Amino acid sequence: MTAAHDPDAAVLVLEDGTSYRGRAYGRRGTTTGEVVFTTGMSGYQETLTDPSYHRQIVVMTAPHIGNTGVNDEDAESAGLQVAGLVVRDPARRTSSWRATGDLASELTEQGVVGISHLDTRALTRRLRDAGVMRAGIFSGDSLPAHLGADESAALLATVLAEPAMAGADLAREVTTPEAYVLEPSGSFAGTEPRAVVVAIDLGMKAMTAKRLTERGARVHVLPADATYADIAALAPDGVFYSNGPGDPAAATDVVATIREVLDAKTPFFGICFGNQLLGRALGFDTYKLTFGHRGINQPVQDLATGKVDITSHNHGFAVDVPIGEPVTAPHDGGRFGRVEVSHICLNDRVVEGIRALDLPAFAVQYHPEAASGPNDAAHLFDQFLTMMKGA
Protein backbone atom coordinates (compact mmCIF):
# COMPACT_ATOMS: atom_id res chain seq x y z
CA MET A 1 0.00 0.00 0.00
CA THR A 2 1.35 3.44 -0.86
CA ALA A 3 0.26 6.97 -0.09
CA ALA A 4 -0.40 7.55 -3.80
CA HIS A 5 -3.03 4.78 -3.82
CA ASP A 6 -4.40 5.53 -0.36
CA PRO A 7 -4.73 9.20 0.65
CA ASP A 8 -5.64 8.16 4.21
CA ALA A 9 -2.42 6.20 4.81
CA ALA A 10 -0.27 7.28 7.76
CA VAL A 11 2.84 6.05 9.52
CA LEU A 12 4.29 6.55 13.00
CA VAL A 13 8.10 6.46 13.15
CA LEU A 14 10.02 6.09 16.43
CA GLU A 15 13.54 7.40 16.90
CA ASP A 16 14.86 3.83 17.17
CA GLY A 17 13.68 3.22 13.60
CA THR A 18 10.56 1.22 14.51
CA SER A 19 7.52 2.19 12.44
CA TYR A 20 3.79 1.50 12.62
CA ARG A 21 1.35 1.90 9.73
CA GLY A 22 -2.15 3.22 10.28
CA ARG A 23 -4.78 5.62 9.01
CA ALA A 24 -4.70 9.40 9.10
CA TYR A 25 -6.78 10.87 11.92
CA GLY A 26 -7.33 14.61 12.26
CA ARG A 27 -5.17 16.91 10.18
CA ARG A 28 -2.97 15.40 7.49
CA GLY A 29 0.68 16.36 7.55
CA THR A 30 3.76 15.94 9.76
CA THR A 31 4.21 16.28 13.50
CA THR A 32 7.06 15.35 15.82
CA GLY A 33 7.43 15.16 19.58
CA GLU A 34 8.08 12.82 22.47
CA VAL A 35 5.70 9.87 22.22
CA VAL A 36 4.09 8.86 25.54
CA PHE A 37 1.15 6.70 26.57
CA THR A 38 -1.71 7.35 28.98
CA THR A 39 -3.78 4.62 30.57
CA GLY A 40 -6.95 6.63 31.20
CA MET A 41 -10.07 4.98 29.83
CA SER A 42 -11.99 8.26 29.84
CA GLY A 43 -11.30 11.98 29.91
CA TYR A 44 -9.52 12.26 26.58
CA GLN A 45 -10.63 15.87 26.09
CA GLU A 46 -9.02 16.92 29.38
CA THR A 47 -5.89 15.02 28.36
CA LEU A 48 -5.62 16.63 24.94
CA THR A 49 -6.08 20.14 26.38
CA ASP A 50 -3.62 19.67 29.27
CA PRO A 51 -0.60 21.99 28.70
CA SER A 52 1.64 19.41 30.38
CA TYR A 53 1.41 17.43 27.11
CA HIS A 54 2.99 20.26 25.13
CA ARG A 55 5.41 18.85 22.52
CA GLN A 56 4.24 15.28 23.16
CA ILE A 57 2.48 12.74 20.93
CA VAL A 58 -0.04 10.97 23.14
CA VAL A 59 -0.94 7.30 22.73
CA MET A 60 -4.32 6.38 24.20
CA THR A 61 -4.11 2.82 25.55
CA ALA A 62 -7.90 2.58 25.79
CA PRO A 63 -8.85 1.18 22.36
CA HIS A 64 -12.05 3.12 21.65
CA ILE A 65 -11.65 6.91 21.64
CA GLY A 66 -13.99 9.70 20.58
CA ASN A 67 -17.37 8.23 21.47
CA THR A 68 -18.38 11.20 23.66
CA GLY A 69 -17.14 13.80 21.18
CA VAL A 70 -15.96 17.15 22.49
CA ASN A 71 -17.81 19.88 24.37
CA ASP A 72 -17.39 23.45 25.57
CA GLU A 73 -17.05 22.58 29.27
CA ASP A 74 -14.29 20.00 29.72
CA ALA A 75 -11.30 21.72 28.12
CA GLU A 76 -8.42 22.42 30.52
CA SER A 77 -6.98 25.24 28.41
CA ALA A 78 -7.80 27.42 25.41
CA GLY A 79 -7.14 24.65 22.89
CA LEU A 80 -5.56 21.30 22.12
CA GLN A 81 -2.03 21.13 23.52
CA VAL A 82 -0.70 17.80 22.27
CA ALA A 83 1.73 17.55 19.37
CA GLY A 84 -0.10 14.51 18.02
CA LEU A 85 -2.56 11.74 18.88
CA VAL A 86 -2.42 7.96 18.44
CA VAL A 87 -5.58 5.86 18.82
CA ARG A 88 -6.53 2.33 17.86
CA ASP A 89 -10.24 2.57 17.12
CA PRO A 90 -11.73 6.07 16.64
CA ALA A 91 -15.47 6.33 17.17
CA ARG A 92 -17.50 6.40 13.98
CA ARG A 93 -20.12 8.61 15.56
CA THR A 94 -20.50 10.81 18.63
CA SER A 95 -22.91 9.65 21.32
CA SER A 96 -23.29 12.13 24.19
CA TRP A 97 -25.89 14.74 25.01
CA ARG A 98 -23.07 17.05 26.12
CA ALA A 99 -21.19 16.92 22.81
CA THR A 100 -20.88 20.05 20.67
CA GLY A 101 -18.64 18.41 18.08
CA ASP A 102 -16.67 15.30 17.19
CA LEU A 103 -13.05 14.61 18.05
CA ALA A 104 -11.77 14.05 14.49
CA SER A 105 -13.12 17.42 13.35
CA GLU A 106 -11.67 19.12 16.43
CA LEU A 107 -8.24 17.69 15.66
CA THR A 108 -8.48 18.89 12.07
CA GLU A 109 -9.69 22.38 12.99
CA GLN A 110 -6.94 22.87 15.57
CA GLY A 111 -4.21 21.42 13.37
CA VAL A 112 -3.36 18.29 15.35
CA VAL A 113 -1.95 15.43 13.26
CA GLY A 114 -3.07 12.02 14.42
CA ILE A 115 -2.95 8.38 13.42
CA SER A 116 -5.45 5.57 14.05
CA HIS A 117 -5.95 1.88 13.39
CA LEU A 118 -2.56 0.76 14.60
CA ASP A 119 -1.71 -1.70 17.36
CA THR A 120 -1.51 0.62 20.38
CA ARG A 121 -0.92 -2.36 22.67
CA ALA A 122 2.25 -3.30 20.77
CA LEU A 123 3.35 0.33 20.71
CA THR A 124 2.79 0.70 24.45
CA ARG A 125 4.79 -2.45 25.16
CA ARG A 126 7.59 -1.03 23.03
CA LEU A 127 7.61 2.21 25.02
CA ARG A 128 7.50 0.36 28.34
CA ASP A 129 10.50 -1.75 27.34
CA ALA A 130 12.62 0.84 25.51
CA GLY A 131 11.34 4.00 27.21
CA VAL A 132 9.54 6.98 25.73
CA MET A 133 11.34 8.51 22.79
CA ARG A 134 11.02 11.01 19.98
CA ALA A 135 8.60 10.13 17.21
CA GLY A 136 6.85 11.51 14.17
CA ILE A 137 3.49 11.01 12.47
CA PHE A 138 3.44 11.38 8.69
CA SER A 139 0.36 11.44 6.46
CA GLY A 140 -1.03 13.20 3.41
CA ASP A 141 1.54 14.96 1.24
CA SER A 142 4.26 14.44 3.86
CA LEU A 143 4.12 10.65 3.42
CA PRO A 144 6.08 9.44 0.35
CA ALA A 145 4.18 7.32 -2.15
CA HIS A 146 6.84 4.66 -1.79
CA LEU A 147 8.50 3.94 1.55
CA GLY A 148 11.82 2.52 0.49
CA ALA A 149 15.06 2.70 2.44
CA ASP A 150 15.83 6.26 1.37
CA GLU A 151 12.33 7.54 2.13
CA SER A 152 12.24 5.83 5.52
CA ALA A 153 15.65 7.29 6.36
CA ALA A 154 14.34 10.76 5.51
CA LEU A 155 11.37 10.35 7.84
CA LEU A 156 13.65 9.12 10.62
CA ALA A 157 15.92 12.12 10.10
CA THR A 158 12.91 14.38 10.65
CA VAL A 159 12.19 12.59 13.93
CA LEU A 160 15.79 12.84 15.10
CA ALA A 161 15.77 16.59 14.44
CA GLU A 162 13.14 17.00 17.20
CA PRO A 163 14.79 18.27 20.41
CA ALA A 164 14.84 15.81 23.29
CA MET A 165 12.58 16.43 26.29
CA ALA A 166 15.52 16.20 28.71
CA GLY A 167 16.84 19.73 29.11
CA ALA A 168 13.74 21.37 27.62
CA ASP A 169 12.47 24.54 29.33
CA LEU A 170 8.86 24.65 28.15
CA ALA A 171 6.76 26.35 30.82
CA ARG A 172 7.20 29.76 29.20
CA GLU A 173 5.72 28.39 25.98
CA VAL A 174 2.38 27.49 27.60
CA THR A 175 2.00 29.95 30.47
CA THR A 176 -0.57 32.76 30.55
CA PRO A 177 0.69 35.82 28.64
CA GLU A 178 -0.52 38.15 31.37
CA ALA A 179 -1.74 38.06 34.96
CA TYR A 180 -5.43 37.75 35.83
CA VAL A 181 -7.59 37.32 38.94
CA LEU A 182 -10.26 34.74 39.78
CA GLU A 183 -12.71 35.44 42.58
CA PRO A 184 -14.33 32.96 45.00
CA SER A 185 -16.90 30.78 43.25
CA GLY A 186 -19.63 28.26 43.99
CA SER A 187 -21.06 28.63 47.48
CA PHE A 188 -18.46 31.35 48.18
CA ALA A 189 -19.37 33.51 45.17
CA GLY A 190 -19.80 37.15 46.11
CA THR A 191 -18.16 36.73 49.52
CA GLU A 192 -14.92 38.08 50.89
CA PRO A 193 -12.09 35.66 50.12
CA ARG A 194 -11.06 33.20 52.79
CA ALA A 195 -7.51 33.42 51.49
CA VAL A 196 -5.50 35.15 48.77
CA VAL A 197 -3.45 32.77 46.64
CA VAL A 198 -0.84 33.57 44.03
CA ALA A 199 -0.83 30.75 41.47
CA ILE A 200 2.16 30.54 39.15
CA ASP A 201 0.98 29.21 35.80
CA LEU A 202 3.57 26.77 34.46
CA GLY A 203 0.93 25.15 32.25
CA MET A 204 -1.90 25.16 34.77
CA LYS A 205 -5.12 23.32 34.06
CA ALA A 206 -8.34 25.31 34.37
CA MET A 207 -9.80 22.98 37.00
CA THR A 208 -6.92 23.65 39.38
CA ALA A 209 -7.81 27.30 39.89
CA LYS A 210 -11.48 26.31 40.16
CA ARG A 211 -10.67 23.94 43.03
CA LEU A 212 -9.15 26.90 44.89
CA THR A 213 -11.90 29.44 44.13
CA GLU A 214 -14.67 27.00 45.08
CA ARG A 215 -13.04 26.83 48.51
CA GLY A 216 -13.30 30.59 48.87
CA ALA A 217 -9.88 31.69 47.65
CA ARG A 218 -9.12 34.71 45.52
CA VAL A 219 -6.54 33.50 43.00
CA HIS A 220 -4.04 35.78 41.30
CA VAL A 221 -2.67 33.82 38.33
CA LEU A 222 0.79 34.99 37.28
CA PRO A 223 3.01 33.97 34.33
CA ALA A 224 5.84 31.48 34.73
CA ASP A 225 8.46 34.23 34.76
CA ALA A 226 6.91 36.04 37.74
CA THR A 227 9.55 37.22 40.21
CA TYR A 228 9.34 37.08 43.97
CA ALA A 229 8.73 40.84 43.94
CA ASP A 230 5.68 40.24 41.72
CA ILE A 231 4.42 37.64 44.20
CA ALA A 232 5.13 39.63 47.36
CA ALA A 233 3.41 42.73 45.93
CA LEU A 234 0.10 40.86 46.16
CA ALA A 235 0.62 39.96 49.85
CA PRO A 236 -0.64 36.40 49.39
CA ASP A 237 -1.64 34.04 52.16
CA GLY A 238 -0.18 31.22 50.09
CA VAL A 239 1.66 30.50 46.85
CA PHE A 240 0.77 27.70 44.45
CA TYR A 241 2.96 26.31 41.64
CA SER A 242 1.15 24.35 38.95
CA ASN A 243 1.72 21.44 36.62
CA GLY A 244 3.52 22.02 33.35
CA PRO A 245 5.74 20.54 30.64
CA GLY A 246 9.48 20.14 30.31
CA ASP A 247 12.53 19.21 32.35
CA PRO A 248 12.55 20.70 35.88
CA ALA A 249 16.35 20.88 35.75
CA ALA A 250 16.03 23.51 33.02
CA ALA A 251 13.72 25.82 35.03
CA THR A 252 16.49 27.40 37.09
CA ASP A 253 14.90 30.86 37.33
CA VAL A 254 11.65 29.40 38.67
CA VAL A 255 13.55 27.35 41.25
CA ALA A 256 15.36 30.49 42.44
CA THR A 257 12.01 32.25 42.93
CA ILE A 258 10.62 29.31 44.93
CA ARG A 259 13.61 29.58 47.27
CA GLU A 260 12.65 33.19 47.99
CA VAL A 261 9.09 32.06 48.76
CA LEU A 262 10.46 29.44 51.16
CA ASP A 263 12.76 32.01 52.80
CA ALA A 264 9.70 34.19 53.43
CA LYS A 265 7.93 31.19 55.04
CA THR A 266 4.87 31.81 52.89
CA PRO A 267 2.69 28.66 52.73
CA PHE A 268 3.55 26.74 49.55
CA PHE A 269 1.64 24.08 47.62
CA GLY A 270 2.78 22.54 44.34
CA ILE A 271 1.48 19.82 42.05
CA CYS A 272 3.23 17.83 39.34
CA PHE A 273 5.87 20.17 37.84
CA GLY A 274 5.48 22.30 40.97
CA ASN A 275 6.44 19.26 43.06
CA GLN A 276 9.58 18.69 41.02
CA LEU A 277 10.55 22.36 41.29
CA LEU A 278 10.02 22.38 45.06
CA GLY A 279 12.30 19.36 45.27
CA ARG A 280 15.01 21.13 43.29
CA ALA A 281 14.58 24.31 45.36
CA LEU A 282 15.23 22.23 48.48
CA GLY A 283 18.40 20.88 46.87
CA PHE A 284 17.31 17.45 45.66
CA ASP A 285 17.86 16.10 42.15
CA THR A 286 15.20 15.15 39.63
CA TYR A 287 15.44 12.42 37.01
CA LYS A 288 13.60 11.25 33.93
CA LEU A 289 11.39 8.19 34.28
CA THR A 290 11.63 5.42 31.68
CA PHE A 291 8.05 5.82 30.50
CA GLY A 292 6.45 8.07 33.11
CA HIS A 293 3.10 7.96 34.88
CA ARG A 294 0.13 9.07 32.78
CA GLY A 295 -3.48 8.12 33.42
CA ILE A 296 -6.31 8.47 35.91
CA ASN A 297 -5.92 5.14 37.71
CA GLN A 298 -2.58 5.40 39.56
CA PRO A 299 -2.47 4.14 43.20
CA VAL A 300 -0.68 6.49 45.61
CA GLN A 301 -0.13 5.82 49.32
CA ASP A 302 -0.01 8.51 52.00
CA LEU A 303 2.86 7.28 54.17
CA ALA A 304 1.57 9.11 57.26
CA THR A 305 -1.82 7.39 57.28
CA GLY A 306 -1.36 4.35 55.06
CA LYS A 307 -4.39 5.46 53.04
CA VAL A 308 -4.32 4.74 49.30
CA ASP A 309 -5.80 7.21 46.82
CA ILE A 310 -6.47 6.45 43.16
CA THR A 311 -5.12 9.49 41.38
CA SER A 312 -4.62 11.24 38.05
CA HIS A 313 -1.03 11.52 36.77
CA ASN A 314 0.88 13.14 33.93
CA HIS A 315 4.61 13.28 34.53
CA GLY A 316 7.81 12.02 32.99
CA PHE A 317 10.19 13.28 35.68
CA ALA A 318 10.39 12.59 39.42
CA VAL A 319 12.12 13.92 42.54
CA ASP A 320 14.97 11.92 44.03
CA VAL A 321 14.34 12.08 47.80
CA PRO A 322 15.11 9.16 50.14
CA ILE A 323 11.99 7.31 51.29
CA GLY A 324 11.80 6.70 55.03
CA GLU A 325 13.05 8.91 57.84
CA PRO A 326 13.16 12.70 57.32
CA VAL A 327 16.38 14.09 55.84
CA THR A 328 17.92 17.56 55.85
CA ALA A 329 17.29 19.47 52.63
CA PRO A 330 20.67 19.69 50.89
CA HIS A 331 20.45 23.25 49.58
CA ASP A 332 22.79 25.81 51.17
CA GLY A 333 23.87 23.74 54.14
CA GLY A 334 20.35 22.69 55.07
CA ARG A 335 18.86 26.14 55.61
CA PHE A 336 15.38 24.88 54.70
CA GLY A 337 15.42 22.25 57.44
CA ARG A 338 14.02 18.74 57.31
CA VAL A 339 12.05 17.15 54.49
CA GLU A 340 10.19 13.85 54.24
CA VAL A 341 8.58 11.84 51.48
CA SER A 342 4.85 12.02 52.07
CA HIS A 343 3.47 9.87 49.23
CA ILE A 344 4.72 7.06 46.99
CA CYS A 345 3.34 5.31 43.91
CA LEU A 346 2.46 1.72 44.75
CA ASN A 347 3.24 0.54 41.22
CA ASP A 348 6.96 1.35 41.37
CA ARG A 349 7.65 3.27 44.63
CA VAL A 350 8.43 6.49 42.81
CA VAL A 351 8.19 9.54 45.12
CA GLU A 352 4.76 11.15 44.65
CA GLY A 353 4.84 13.82 47.36
CA ILE A 354 7.22 15.69 49.65
CA ARG A 355 6.65 17.75 52.79
CA ALA A 356 8.92 20.26 54.52
CA LEU A 357 8.84 19.79 58.29
CA ASP A 358 10.33 23.14 59.30
CA LEU A 359 8.55 25.27 56.68
CA PRO A 360 4.89 25.52 55.58
CA ALA A 361 5.47 23.78 52.25
CA PHE A 362 4.27 20.57 50.61
CA ALA A 363 3.71 19.24 47.11
CA VAL A 364 2.47 16.16 45.28
CA GLN A 365 3.41 14.71 41.93
CA TYR A 366 -0.13 13.92 40.81
CA HIS A 367 -3.28 15.92 40.00
CA PRO A 368 -5.68 16.36 42.93
CA GLU A 369 -7.91 18.60 40.80
CA ALA A 370 -9.16 15.36 39.15
CA ALA A 371 -9.70 16.64 35.63
CA SER A 372 -10.14 14.03 34.53
CA GLY A 373 -9.93 11.41 37.23
CA PRO A 374 -11.11 10.39 40.70
CA ASN A 375 -11.61 12.91 43.51
CA ASP A 376 -9.72 10.90 46.13
CA ALA A 377 -7.02 13.56 46.57
CA ALA A 378 -9.19 16.68 46.55
CA HIS A 379 -8.61 17.03 50.30
CA LEU A 380 -5.13 18.41 49.52
CA PHE A 381 -6.69 21.73 48.54
CA ASP A 382 -8.39 21.81 51.94
CA GLN A 383 -5.03 21.07 53.53
CA PHE A 384 -3.57 24.07 51.71
CA LEU A 385 -6.39 26.31 52.96
CA THR A 386 -5.84 25.05 56.50
CA MET A 387 -2.13 25.74 56.22
CA MET A 388 -2.79 29.31 55.08
CA LYS A 389 -5.29 29.94 57.87
CA GLY A 390 -2.80 28.57 60.40
CA ALA A 391 -0.04 30.81 59.09
Image (cartoon, helix red, strand yellow):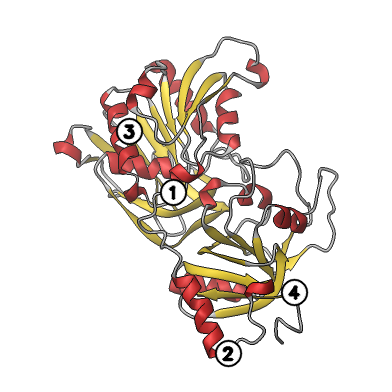
Q: Is there a contact, CB below 8 Å, between mark 4 and mark 3?
A: no
Q: Most extreme residue toward the top, as rendered?
A: 192
**Which of the image's four quarters has the C terminus?**
top left
The residue under label 2 is which amino acid type? Gly
Residue 258 — which label?
3
- Dot 4: element: loop
- Dot 2: element: loop
Which residue is labeled 2 in the image?
148
> What is the CA distance from the residue labelled 2 to the residue labelled 4?
19 Å
Residue under the point 33% across and 49% down: 250
Q: Nearer the viewer, mark 2 or mark 1?
A: 2
The mark that comes first in sequence, 2 or 3, is 2
In this rendering, does residue 138 appear at all?
Answer: yes
Figure check: 377 above or below 360? below
Callout 3 environment at 10 Å: few (<14), some (14 to 19), or many (20+)? many
Which residue is labeled 1 in the image?
170
Callout 4 environment at 10 Å: few (<14), some (14 to 19), or many (20+)? some
> What is the CA distance from the residue labelled 3 to the residue labelled 1?
18 Å
